[in-house]
Image (cartoon, grey):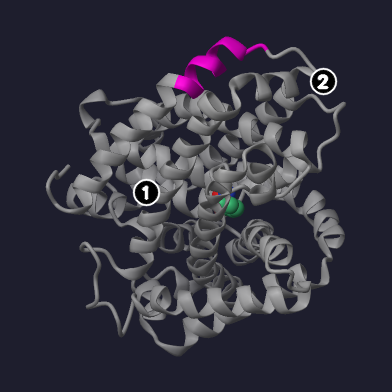
């Protein structure tokens, strides 16, 4: 459950729908699911098994198996820190939207220009970002995970129920059927290497992989727990919430664009702002939409908080272990550092929007560099480490302690050959794309 709490977050509700909308709908979904049950499964089993076997946090785990390879753990911690910085910016937007719904301003939110006007401001988004980071910090420093865990055990099921209801509502909006078709029927002509790359990055991100987080959670798992089953459950839950989120948003886009194909394509391609622009319109069109909107953004806030806690915890626990810092100062350093690093991501929508790196604003750049470059590198090193340094048996023996390992044959081939080759191919493509040598 804790691992699912880390996995389910903005990645599912904010990131997945806009990628699916942009990358061709059904074809993206198909590739995503295939990746989750093959790659995602392999890497998650590996991380959890390494954690349970060594009983240590990421760097310690790599160190105890083969000392020279602890740098893989450091890459993971570095990635977690970068993600934390811009995750908080979006978390801040979520709090702002919650606040606006509670204040009864739901009508103002339905205006398409609201989001851009708000995120383009200088101080307000920074303030909400600061608030989100502060809350994450307070939870991490007080170690009140127990309380948070209790809260999220109640709130997560509520999120599922509310999402099902909103998705069902969206499906019955006039013209929404086209959107459902777009999301579920793959159109193979829409496939580009970018679809694959986006799906891969999303998979790592959404499942909290290649960041050592699952190693940490694995170290808390008991030997009697069925490891393979745990992974399947996390996958199911995580992918389920993503698909529900896409079902809330994508059919609504088709409905609101009502036959205007230029508007439709602009809406499908709008990227990170999609959830914030489309959902308030859905709420605006339903009875008691203000209440539903407030409830929804509150639940998204909790989902985001459990994820950002796991990101901060990953960095803090490493600093405590390795630099012998106490929890208090370590948390303050990490939270403060992530806030400073996040400032460009926040300002990149406004005063700093003219600064771009590889044609991307700061937030998109940090998102790209972590999901499309560093996480695949981390995953590649993990595969090579298991396949060729410690040996696949280390993982399969660990899995078999508690249960049969049904996908073992697939696992072995994946980790030694298929995953490394595919990751390298995808990485090369993504770097060429970033430098403008390839365009899709
Ligand atoms: N998986 C989380 C989400 O979907 C984000 C996250 C990534 C959390 C990596 C922890 C580690 O929002």
Q: Name the residue under label 1.
A: 373
Residue 409: say if magenta.
Answer: yes
Which x, y percent locates residue 425? 29, 32
Most common secondary structure along the magenta stretch: helix
Q: The C terminus lies in which quarter of the figure?
A: top left
Does 368 appear above or below 123?
Answer: above
Closer to the N terminus: mark 1 or mark 2?
A: 1
Pointer 1 local density, CA inside 10 Å: few below 14, some 14–19, many at least 20:
some
Question: Between marks 1 and 2, how big is the CA–CA gap?
Answer: 35 Å
Is 249 placed left or right of 263 in the picture? right
The kind of secondary structure element at disc 1 is: helix
Which x, y percent locates residue 239? 56, 36
The residue sitting at 70% across, 42% down in the picture is 64
Q: Decide if residue 262 is in sight here.
A: yes
Q: 362 or 253, which lies in front?
A: 362
Which x, y percent locates residue 194? 27, 39
Q: Mark 2 points at which residue?
A: 402
Residue extending furthest left? 437
Is 134 placed left or right of 424 in the picture? right
The residue sitting at 40% across, 77% down in the picture is 119
The residue sitting at 24% across, 45% down in the picture is 259
The kind of secondary structure element at disc 2 is: loop
Does 397 appear above or below 204?
Answer: above
Pointer 2 local density, CA inside 10 Å: few below 14, some 14–19, many at least 20:
some
Task: Write down the region rendered in magenta.
Answer: 406-416
Q: 383 or 151, which lies in front?
A: 383
């Amino acid at each position: 459950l804790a691992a699912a709490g880390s996995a389910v977050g903005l990645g599912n509700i904010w990131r997945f729908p806009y990628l699916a909308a942009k990358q061709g709908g059904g074809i993206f979904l198909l590739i995503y699911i295939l990746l989750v049950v093959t790659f995602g499964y392999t890497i998650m089993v590996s991380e959890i098994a390494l954690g349970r076997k060594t009983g240590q946090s990421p760097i310690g785990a790599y160190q105890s198996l083969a000392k020279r390879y602890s740098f893989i753990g450091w890459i993971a911690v570095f990635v977690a820190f970068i993600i934390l910085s811009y995750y908080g910016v979006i978390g801040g937007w979520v709090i702002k939207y919650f606040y606006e719904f509670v204040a009864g301003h739901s009508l103002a939110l339905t205006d398409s220009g609201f989001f851009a006007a708000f995120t383009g401001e200088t101080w307000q988004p920074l303030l909400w970002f600061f608030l989100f980071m502060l809350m994450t910090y307070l939870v991490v420093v007080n170690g009140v995970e127990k309380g948070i865990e209790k809260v999220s055990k109640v709130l997560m099921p509520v999120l599922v129920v509310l999402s099902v209801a909103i998705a069902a509502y969206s499906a019955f909006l006039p013209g929404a059927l086209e959107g459902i078709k777009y999301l579920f029927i793959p159109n193979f002509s829409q496939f580009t290497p970018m679809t694959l790359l986006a799906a891969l990055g999303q998979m790592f991100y959404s499942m909290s992989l290649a960041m050592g987080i699952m190693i940490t959670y694995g170290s808390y798992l008991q030997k009697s727990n069925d490891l393979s089953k745990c992974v399947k459950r996390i996958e199911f839950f995580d992918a389920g919430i993503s698909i529900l989120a896409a079902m809330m948003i994508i059919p609504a886009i088709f409905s609101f664009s009502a036959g205007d194909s230029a508007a439709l394509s602009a809406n499908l391609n709008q990227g990170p702002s999609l959830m914030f622009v489309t959902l308030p319109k859905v709420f605006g069109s339903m009875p008691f939409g203000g209440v539903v909107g407030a409830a929804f953004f509150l639940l998204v806030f909790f989902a985001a908080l459990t994820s950002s806690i796991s990101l901060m915890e990953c960095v803090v626990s490493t600093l405590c272990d390795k630099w012998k810092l106490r929890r208090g100062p370590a948390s303050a350093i990490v939270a403060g550092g992530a806030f400073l690093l996040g400032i460009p991501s926040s300002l990149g929508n406004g005063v700093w929007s003219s600064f771009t790196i590889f044609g991307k604003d700061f937030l998109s750049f940090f998102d790209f560099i972590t999901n499309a470059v560093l996480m695949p590198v981390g995953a590649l090193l993990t595969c090579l480490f298991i396949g060729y340094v410690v040996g696949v048996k280390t993982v399969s023996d660990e899995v078999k302690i508690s249960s049969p390992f049904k996908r073992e044959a697939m696992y072995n081939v994946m980790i030694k050959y298929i995953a490394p080759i595919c990751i390298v191919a995808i990485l090369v493509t993504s770097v060429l794309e970033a430098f403008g040598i390839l365009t899709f």
